[in-house]
Image (cartoon, coloured by chain):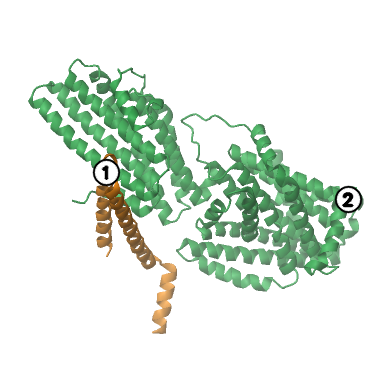
Chain colours: A green, B orange
Amino acid sequence: MVKKLLIIILLIITAFYVISQENVKIILAGIAIFLIGMHFMEDGFKLFSGGTLETILEKFTKNKYTSVLTGFITTSIVQSSSLISVIVISFLSVELISLTQGMAIVFGANLGSTTTAWIVSALGLKLKISLYAMPMIIFGVIFRFSKNNTYIGLGNVLLGLGFIFLGISYMKDGFDTLRTAIDLASYSIGGIPGILLYILIGAIATVVIQSSSATMAIIITALAGGNILYIDALALAIGANVGTTVTAVIGSLTSNQNGKRLAFGHFIFNISTGLIAVFLIYSLQDFVDFLAPFFGIAEDNYSMKLALFHTIFNLLGIIVLFPFIGIIVKSSKKFINDKIKKTSKPKYLEKANIKIPYNAMVSIQKEIIHLYDNAQKAILHALSIHTSELKTKKDIKAIIAKPVIKIDTDLNDIYQNNLKTLYSEIIEFALISQQNMNKEQIEYVTQLKLASNIIIKILKDTRDIQKNMDFYLRSKNESIQKEYSLIKEELATFILEVNILKENKHDDIEVSTLIQVDKDRLENLDVMNNNRIEELIRNEKITSKMATSLINDSTNAYNICKNLLRVGNILFIRDEKLRSLGETDEVK
Amino acid sequence: MKLNKLIKSIESFFISDKKEIKNKSEEINNLIKKLINKKKILQKKLKYAEKTDSKQYEKKLKAVKKLIKKAKKIQSSKS
């Protein structure tokens, strides 16, 4: 209620100023256009990169040093530390990178976000950038008509840049004329209270606008227009850095544990950096004055000096805090504990991943492996095999040789209470995330959905065998007992084969070859089984009731093994062509 | 003539199917090359393998040959 009331009051005040004050209207319009530009840029880079950004972040983050550098470079290019943070959180959720690497990327991203200040102060104020904005907007819109996602992405990036330039231009014009109407600089308090007040204003502005880059653009244009004093602008920049952590912390509330830990690290980094900057504000100001000539910055070019200050204090933060990154990671883990998830709860399906197609795909793949793990555990229990007993091929003979000790397993109950929920969540997540994917990604996710469906089918087929298996493995008729032992051996062997593929030790060609070897073996087994069963019936070694059960269960076991290999083919082969070979019928 | 060229380039901007087909046939060619390479490696291994390992290599070789056959079938259906 209070929140709604505050929003209404804020809207009324904004409407009043927009109607009555021409300058305020222009500045606010500039901020709005700038923010929409940022939005288009983010969206554009997501589409335009088509997974390139994710590949870069995955490949060039082998250690914490390269992670900082990658965070810096990627953020400088895409101009959005929040986009990089979202990707990092999503990487963490699918365990593609470690938390230390993630934090190092965020450290680098903080430094990378300072390039916005350089762009605004170097280009935005010196040149009439609105002239460049128009062609960008025009071509951006044209590119968006394309059916190709890369061109749409490029269109969005151009449109975003165009709007950002246009926004800066509006803000600049607004602040330029505002100064003639009202001299805000004359209200400056000065001294430590003034600095603290401006830090607070900078932080609040960033929390409201939800973008430190936009706040920096406002500060720089206001400073260039002479609306604020240089020292107050420095304090506002520190405030913007502090404010952005609030946005990150709020954003992480709906994220997983690793997302929260990352936000914790981000918070520690920005608060510590902010504190260092506040304590050293006058020394840093002198240091900037000293360095400015080396960068070709004129003595009275305060906007560029502010950009330099912004970069220096963030760099200082990295230098001071980088050695403690391990401690920050440890305390974040201590502070935010791991939640023990039920088997029915998804482990990898994070909402944040939906918008990043590559990561959404990895999330779905990992979650289906999780579904498979749970299903194969239940299946083995249904066959009276403990998962710990089945590690190597040698174990199978030992399992079959020893007397059967039944493990109480209700596959119906396991399906209804655990796996059904997980299965439904996978399908729902896949359907939503497919909306943001390209053709190849959609095709792969469709196959992944098929794999999860097959896993459930395997579970149901095992349920159909379970009762007879329990019964005939204890039968006094040696022939039928032997046949069911062979079915049990066959199922255990094929589950083990898929588990070996899961270990990820082989390349795609080897995995595909191993699956084909297993397929050949399965076909041979099927022929042998059928021949044996026919012989048993002919020689009246089993009753007709036993024969019917055996024929049905043998067919079921064949289907289970075939489906296990299909699951292995979809889940563990990355090459699309090779995967499709695995799905192709045998060539005679 | 020039107008024709312009229409074609606009068409290729909005529809990227032809390029896709070319890429896909290249992909299948590369895959066949990789599989043939695997076949050669297995043949070499089989030549110098001990009796205990040779059975496994034989099975793998048979499997790779089947995969090559399947890939070639896809290749011929595309062309």
User: Residue A281: x, y in percent?
Assistant: 85, 52
Question: Which dot, 1 or 2, sits closer to the camera?
Answer: 1
Chain ID of residue with mark 2: A
User: Residue A556: x, y in percent?
Assistant: 24, 32
| Camera-side residue of B48 and B37 | B48
Relative to A174, residue A587 above or below = above
**Residue for point 89% across, 56% down:** A187
User: Residue A454: x, y in percent?
Assistant: 33, 39
Relative to A145, residue A549 above or below = above
User: Residue A296: x, y in percent?
Assistant: 79, 70
What is the quadrant of the N terminus of chain A in the image?
A: top right
Q: Is residue A183 left or right of residue B30?
A: right
Q: Residues within 10 Å of mark 2 (few under 14, many from 20)?
A: some
Q: Secondary structure at mark 1?
A: helix
Same chain under badges 1 and 2? The reply is: no
Residue linked to disc 1:
B54
Q: Residue lying farthest top? A: A476
Residue A319, visible in the rendered structure: yes
Q: Is residue B64 left or right of residue A327?
A: left
Amino acid type, label 2: Gly
Asked if the residue under mark 2 is in contact with the one under mark 1, i.e. CB atoms within 8 Å, the reply is no
Amino acid type, label 1: Ser
Image mark for residue A194: 2
Residue A227, visible in the rendered structure: no
Q: Residues within 10 Å of mark 1 (few under 14, many from 20)?
A: some
Distance from Cα at disc 1 to Cα at disc 2: 83 Å
**Residue for point 78% across, 60% down:** A308
| Camera-side residue of A505 and A348 | A505
